[in-house]
Image (tube, grey):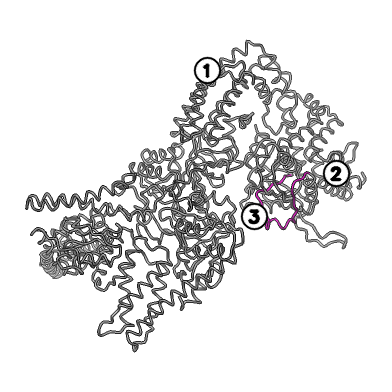
């Protein structure tokens, strides 16, 4: 029996060698609890082996079989290896303990039952945070790297304020006003953040984490100490960590323009699939412009690879929109077509031009065609219902009202939490269009009015004809359909996707649940510009950590450290007060602590094709069932 | 029945028999109704009954029809003050029905006593027979108030006050204990690990029911709560928090995500503000009708919980008349006058009967198409229109 | 019994049924011509009073029958009524509506006999009050108009299929109440009911237009609500009415327009057809036999159809506004107690 146990522990101990993530690293002592990690299969095999061994022992009176000898020898070998590993790991012990705690926490991590398979905003944010911190740290000196990091996302969330904090429980070294652009933030971080290592103790820790940073196999170095603990929790899953790690190994390759875009996307500063695509293409133009082919390779081979790294980062902001995906596919194809003989300079220039042309053709000209086509549909004195904010729809309605002098009434339906329709309604109102603004809860009332058409924008149209668009679209389309009001979708063919999907739950994008905390009509994204829940949480955690470290420091050091930290406390509390003003009203503050409470904020839903009368694209108007036809016919161009 | 009406018309002269001290109460209640200071159908129903109790105890009348006339006048005033506070009219109509039943009963006894059994006095079993009914049965009714002696009148008068007050007491009892009855039935409609959706976070009945289902029958289920933006978001959050504190898996979702999630929802539970005889209902959160439409589209069952007192004998001829609208400040932030936008903010929503699968009341579960019967069991057709 | 007189006097629907009846008689040569003919009486009632509906005419005929035959015993009375009813139903091609009248009459008689055994007074009552029933039936239409007027509001466009006295009295009442609404009338082929209603509405100053029956699908989106009458209301709450009602009902439901049936409660009939094929009709609904000569009209097919209850929003009757399921309750109450 003891052999079995040994074997069990051996296998368990052997595992960490394969899996490098510290999450699965075992406790030094292989105790019985670890048996659980054995899969049933393994256990069965072991039992079989054991039985076989026993039988052998019965038969062979001579004693231990060769097999067993071999086995035990192997075990011993492995044990030794393990021992070595253990010693190696000794250094990381602290880290590991944290991680184990983290694992425990992870069980309480907020994942809704329905959307457990989707990446949450917190996870995404955590990886970005990890990443940005790593990137910035490489810009700063090695010491700062381990020390403090400007949590780039937090800074962006906080609008114009950048907080630089020490990773070692000394938060808010200074409050630097900077423009929200990451570029500036980067500069700020690297230039105005002197290493603030005030105690030898801190120094030691810092050095420790630097050494860890060298070790590519360890978990994200320095990160866990930088980001708020809540985010730390999110980094629990090994898959996520490995993806973050991958990003980090390539962090030097990341272009600042991409970083800036990432932050804008992550904060919903740029929304809508078309604006996002345009922004990405613009960023790519800069990236391509700045690109230098490394020695020993060619542009056509290496640039794709280089871009992939950029795209990996972009993915961390929000999942790529279909438009972005299509544009990227096109761009990669273009790059691969470049003749290796062309000089880098010419190739880069060509590419940039092509990107510009692509944007013009696929978006601007396409929009124009769509507008022309849709306008023939709209009769004078028509009442039109739209949902959310769509660029092409806004232009189309303005064109009809102003240039074609049609007397139209527009009802903009909107929903929480993004309130995209408000912008659209304002734009139309400014131009003197007869606009009515309503919320999705009043659909019944709206459709009791005399509505002639429903015009919808799209995020994407899938190849099975489903419309993938802002949540609520499906509801609007359904109610319209049930009242025999025609639903028309304006959509560039760039938005056509090869993907098929049947319902909105399987694939979707989760937005920040905290956006739903407020009860008012403010746009939480705008509001967060001043004091987001994330920042608040960050500060709170820092404060707790600081208190702890204060106590420790007081024990260890004494007064000089205490002074410096108390001055920081003042600053901090003032920030806290500011945040408190607004946040106190929220009933759901601290919803994370309630284990059975969840908030789901999905961004998209799927509208079945039977609700859609017509899809208006630059190729003309077609039924939703024709989407795959277009995809086939024009595969090359999109 | 029309004879009763005639008699009450004769009594118009005595209508101002309401003592002044009661008038003060009535006026203040009406004022509060008008200012919408009483929220929710439950408190409105209870307060109306309390008022009615005072009113009846203080009222002076010579004939029971006179009393009915006075009550109708009061109900009419209240209804005018707040046309969409349906429970207010409902409870008064219930009391009127009780009184009328008693009168009928009385007359039957009386006619039996007088042994006027010479003709077929059997009450109309089916109104379809109206066509062929003999004209005679009407006569004893007509004769009755005039011919009967005053001594029987006196006897019945005290009776009726008692009957009405007792009716009110019973009704108050019924209303306050409504949740128990509903829960008993509704629990059987939820299975373990079911995902429920409720678009009416302001309904206490729904809340109590869910908690009860969790605690009593120890079912685990997930509840999706829509936000009910703009008017009920706060209530939705409190609702969700309360559920979560009772260890019910609760997920708050924006109103727009209903369609996206409907395919996963097992049942939709809605609270109601009023249920009409066609089986349609008014709910006190906007967006409910769209949610129910979604449910219909996905063939997800919708069940509505409603106390009996929410049943209204009215027919929603003009739905728009029954839907209330709120101020725009909930929908849009204040902005400069030049940039104002038109907007609508419906507070309530009408759910047509075809989008509701079943009503759970404290006396049982009913198909929407059967609601009319339950209503006529408790109300009299003659009292539907309170205006004279 | 000259045809010319008929044309001028009876309403058009009744004219058709009468014609068909004449046709039947001539072909079948009904042998049972005694001193009293229930069918003749029935048709005469219809002919004399344009306002009279078929069930009422049937009841009146039965009353007349009682008066003429003056049965000696209860059993005799019942058999007489039964036989005459059967005869009436058999000889009149479109028997749905009159069947309702006979049903009520029969049931009323049976009830009174069973409950009290007082058949003499019952007979007396029926014989004496014949005219009363007619006036009550007419009053019930006024009652319907009063109840149903709430369904019509200003600016409504109302589609009406077929001619029904109840619908007309409702529309007329609404117009009198100064409700401004407009009417779309279907031609209601193969009858002239559309034109009949059109001229009546025009006479009352109600804005009205007429469309061909096949245009209903096209105009239904512009229409706010649909009103139809009924020849009979089946137990399920579905209605039997002029052919085309079913198509209108389906179209209305598809367009989510309310579909109201305006009818008197004495048209509730104990039938439960499953579909239009299930209705008592003469001949096949689809007749593929060759024409005998060229003068015969090629147009054949059913003249009535059945609209199931799921297409009906509500029934506006003299008993109040009923959901289809309330109809079955009324019928159940009448037959089982």
From the top left corner, tell me how far across and down residue C256 is, in percent.
Answer: 61, 51
Q: Is residue A626 left or right of residue C237?
A: left
C150 or C112: which is nearer to us? C150
From the top left corner, tell me how far across and down residue A468 is, in percent.
Answer: 46, 63
From the top left corner, tell me how far across and down residue A242 is, in percent.
Answer: 26, 66
Mark 3 or mark 2, earlier in chain:
2
Local secondary structure at mark 2: loop
- Residue at image location 76% in from the left, 41% down from the top: C99
Which subunit holds the residue at mark 2?
Answer: C
Of labels 3 and 2, the one closer to you: 3
Label 3, label 2: how far apart the Cα atoms are: 35 Å
B293 or B263: which is nearer to us? B293
Residue found farthest to the bottom: A341
Q: Which residues are magenta?
A: C204-230
Residue for badge 3 = C221
A136 or A433: which is nearer to us? A433
Q: In the picture, which quadrant includes the C terminus of chain A?
A: bottom left
Are the residues under marks 1 and 2 on the same chain? no
B288 over A93 or under it: above or below: above
From the top left corner, tell me how far across and down residue A145 is, in percent.
Answer: 18, 65
- Residue at image location 42% in from the left, 39% down from the top: B209
Label 1, label 2: how far apart the Cα atoms are: 62 Å
B92 or A428: which is nearer to us? A428
Q: Where residue C10 is drawn, which disc sits there?
A: 2
Residue for badge 1 = B58
Magenta run includes residue B365: no
């Amino acid at each position: 029996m003891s052999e079995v146990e040994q074997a069990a522990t051996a296998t368990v101990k052997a595992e960490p060698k394969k899996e490098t993530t510290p999450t699965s690293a075992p406790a030094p002592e292989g105790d019985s609890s670890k048996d659980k990690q054995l899969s049933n299969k393994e256990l069965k095999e072991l039992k079989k082996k054991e039985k076989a061994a026993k039988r052998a022992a019965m038969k062979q009176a001579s004693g231990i079989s060769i097999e067993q000898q071999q086995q035990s020898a192997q075990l011993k070998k492995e044990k030794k290896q393990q021992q070595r590993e253990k010693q190696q790991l000794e250094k990381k012990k602290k880290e590991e303990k944290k991680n184990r705690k983290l694992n425990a926490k992870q069980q309480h991590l907020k994942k809704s039952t329905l959307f457990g398979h989707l990446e949450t905003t917190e996870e995404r944010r955590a990886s970005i945070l990890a990443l940005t911190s790593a990137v910035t740290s490489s810009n700063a000196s090695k010491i700062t790297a381990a020390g403090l990091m400007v949590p780039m996302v937090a800074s962006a969330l906080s609008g114009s304020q950048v907080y630089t904090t020490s990773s070692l429980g000394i938060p808010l070294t200074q409050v630097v006003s900077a423009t929200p652009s990451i570029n500036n933030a980067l500069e700020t971080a690297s230039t105005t953040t002197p290493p603030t290592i005030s105690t030898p103790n801190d120094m030691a820790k810092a050095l420790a984490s630097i050494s860890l940073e060298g070790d590519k196999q360890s978990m994200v170095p320095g990160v866990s100490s930088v980001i708020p603990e809540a985010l730390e929790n999110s980094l629990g899953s090994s898959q996520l960590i490995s993806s973050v790690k991958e990003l980090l190994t390539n962090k030097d390759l990341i272009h600042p323009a991409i970083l800036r875009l990432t932050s804008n996307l992550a904060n919903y500063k740029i929304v809508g699939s078309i604006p996002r695509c345009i922004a990405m293409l613009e960023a790519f133009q800069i990236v391509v412009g700045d690109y230098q082919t490394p020695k020993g390779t060619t542009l056509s081979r290496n640039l794709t690879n280089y871009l992939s790294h950029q795209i990996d980062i972009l993915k961390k902001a929000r999942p790529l929109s279909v438009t972005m995906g299509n544009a990227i596919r096109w761009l990669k194809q273009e790059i691969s077509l470049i003749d290796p003989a062309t000089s880098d300079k010419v190739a880069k220039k060509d590419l940039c031009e092509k990107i510009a042309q692509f944007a013009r053709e696929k978006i601007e000209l396409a929009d124009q065609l769509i507008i022309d086509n849709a306008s023939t549909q709209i009769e004078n004195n028509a009442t039109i219902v739209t949902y959310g904010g769509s660029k092409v729809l806004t232009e189309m309605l303005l064109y009809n009202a102003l240039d074609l002098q049609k007397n139209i009434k527009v009802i903009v339906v909107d929903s929480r939490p993004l309130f995209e329709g408000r912008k659209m309604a304002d734009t139309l109102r400014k131009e003197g269009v007869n606009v009515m603004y309503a919320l999705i809860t009043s659909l019944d009332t709206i459709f009791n009015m005399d509505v002639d058409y429903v015009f919808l924008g799209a995020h994407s149209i899938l190849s099975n004809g489903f419309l993938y668009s802002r949540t609520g679209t499906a509801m609007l389309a359904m109610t319209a359909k049930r009242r025999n009001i025609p639903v028309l979708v304006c959509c560039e063919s760039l938005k056509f996707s090869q993907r098929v999907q049947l319902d909105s739950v399987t694939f979707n994008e989760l937005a920040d649940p905290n956006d739903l905390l407020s009860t008012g009509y403010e746009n939480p994204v705008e509001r967060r510009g001043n004091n987001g829940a994330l920042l608040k949480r960050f500060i709170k955690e820092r404060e707790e950590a600081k208190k702890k470290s204060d106590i420790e420091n007081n024990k260890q050091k004494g007064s000089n450290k205490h002074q410096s930290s108390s001055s920081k406390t003042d600053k901090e509390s003032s920030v806290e007060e500011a945040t408190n003003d607004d946040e106190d009203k929220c009933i759901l503050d601290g919803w994370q602590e309630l284990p059975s409470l969840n908030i789901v904020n999905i961004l998209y839903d799927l509208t079945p094709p039977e609700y859609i009368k017509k899809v208006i694209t630059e190729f003309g108007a077609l039924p939703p069932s024709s989407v795959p036809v277009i995809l086939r016919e024009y595969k090359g161009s999109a | 029945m029309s004879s009763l009406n005639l008699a009450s018309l004769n009594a118009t002269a005595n209508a101002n028999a309401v003592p002044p001290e009661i008038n003060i109460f009535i006026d203040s209640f009406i004022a509060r109704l008008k200012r919408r200071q009483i929220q929710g159908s439950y408190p409105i129903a209870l307060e109306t009954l309390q008022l009615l109790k005072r009113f009846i105890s203080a009222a002076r009348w010579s004939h029971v029809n006179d009393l009915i006339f006075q009550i109708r006048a009061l109900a009419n005033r209240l209804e005018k003050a707040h046309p969409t506070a349906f429970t207010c009219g409902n409870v008064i109509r219930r009391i009127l029905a009780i009184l009328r039943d008693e009168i009928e009963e009385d007359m039957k006894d009386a006619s039996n006593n007088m042994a006027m059994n010479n003709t077929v006095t059997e009450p109309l079993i089916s109104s379809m027979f109206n066509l062929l009914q003999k004209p005679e049965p009407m006569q004893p009714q007509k004769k009755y108030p005039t011919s009967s002696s005053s001594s029987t009148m006196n006897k019945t008068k005290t009776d009726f006050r008692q009957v009405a007050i007792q009716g009110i007491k019973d009704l108050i009892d019924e209303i306050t204990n409504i949740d128990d009855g509903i829960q008993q039935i509704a629990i059987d409609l939820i299975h373990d690990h079911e995902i429920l959706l409720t678009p009416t976070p302001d309904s206490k009945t729904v809340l109590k029911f869910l908690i009860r289902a969790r605690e009593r029958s120890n079912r685990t289920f997930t509840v999706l709560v829509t936000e009910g933006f703009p008017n009920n978001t706060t209530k939705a959050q409190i609702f969700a928090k309360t559920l979560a504190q009772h260890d019910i898996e609760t997920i708050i979702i924006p109103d727009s995500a209903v369609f996206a999630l409907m395919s996963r929802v097992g049942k939709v539970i809605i609270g109601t503000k009023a249920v009409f005889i066609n089986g349609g209902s008014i709910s006190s959160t906007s967006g409910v009708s769209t949610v129910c439409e979604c449910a219909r589209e996905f063939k997800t069952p919708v069940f509505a919980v409603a106390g009996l007192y929410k049943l209204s004998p009215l027919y929603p001829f003009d739905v728009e008349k029954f839907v209330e609208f709120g101020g725009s400040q909930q929908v849009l932030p204040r902005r400069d006058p030049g940039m104002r936008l038109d907007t609508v903010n419906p507070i309530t929503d009408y759910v047509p009967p075809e989008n509701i699968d079943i009503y759970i009341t404290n006396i049982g579960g009913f198909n929407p198409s059967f609601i009319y019967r339950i209503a006529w069991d408790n109300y009299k057709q003659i009292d539907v229109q309170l205006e004279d | 019994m000259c045809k010319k007189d008929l044309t001028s006097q009876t309403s058009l629907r009744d004219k058709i049924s009468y014609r068909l009846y004449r046709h039947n008689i001539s072909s079948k040569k009904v042998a049972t011509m005694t001193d009293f003919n229930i069918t003749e009486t029935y048709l005469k009632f219809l002919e004399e009073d344009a306002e009279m509906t078929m069930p009422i005419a049937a009841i009146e005929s039965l009353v007349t029958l009682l008066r003429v035959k003056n049965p000696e015993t209860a059993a005799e009375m019942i058999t007489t009524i039964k036989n005459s009813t059967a005869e009436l139903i058999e000889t009149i091609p479109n028997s749905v509506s009159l069947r309702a009248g006979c049903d009520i009459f029969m049931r009323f008689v049976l009830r009174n006999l069973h409950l009290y055994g007082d058949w003499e007074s019952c007979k007396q009552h029926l014989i004496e009050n014949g005219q009363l029933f007619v006036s009550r039936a007419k009053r019930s239409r006024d009652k319907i108009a009063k109840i149903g007027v709430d369904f019509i509001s200003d600016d409504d466009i109302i589609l009406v299929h077929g001619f029904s006295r109840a619908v007309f009295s409702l529309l007329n009442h609404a117009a009198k109440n100064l409700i401004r609404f407009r009417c779309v009338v279907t031609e209601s082929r193969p009858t002239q009911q559309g034109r009949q209603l059109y001229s009546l509405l025009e006479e009352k100053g109600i804005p009205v237009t007429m469309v061909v029956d096949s245009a209903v699908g096209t105009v239904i989106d512009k229409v706010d609500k649909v009103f139809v009458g009924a020849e009979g209301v089946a137990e399920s709450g579905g209605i039997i009415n002029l052919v085309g009602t079913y198509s209108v009902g389906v179209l209305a439901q598809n367009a989510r327009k309310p579909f109201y049936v305006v009818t008197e409660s004495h048209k509730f009939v104990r039938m439960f057809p499953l579909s239009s094929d299930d209705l008592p009709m003469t001949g096949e609904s689809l007749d593929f036999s060759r024409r005998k000569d060229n003068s015969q009209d090629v147009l054949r097919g059913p003249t009535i159809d059945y609209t199931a209850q799921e297409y009906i929003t509500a029934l506006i009757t003299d008993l109040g506004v009923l959901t289809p399921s309330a109809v079955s309750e009324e019928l159940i109450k009448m037959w089982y107690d």
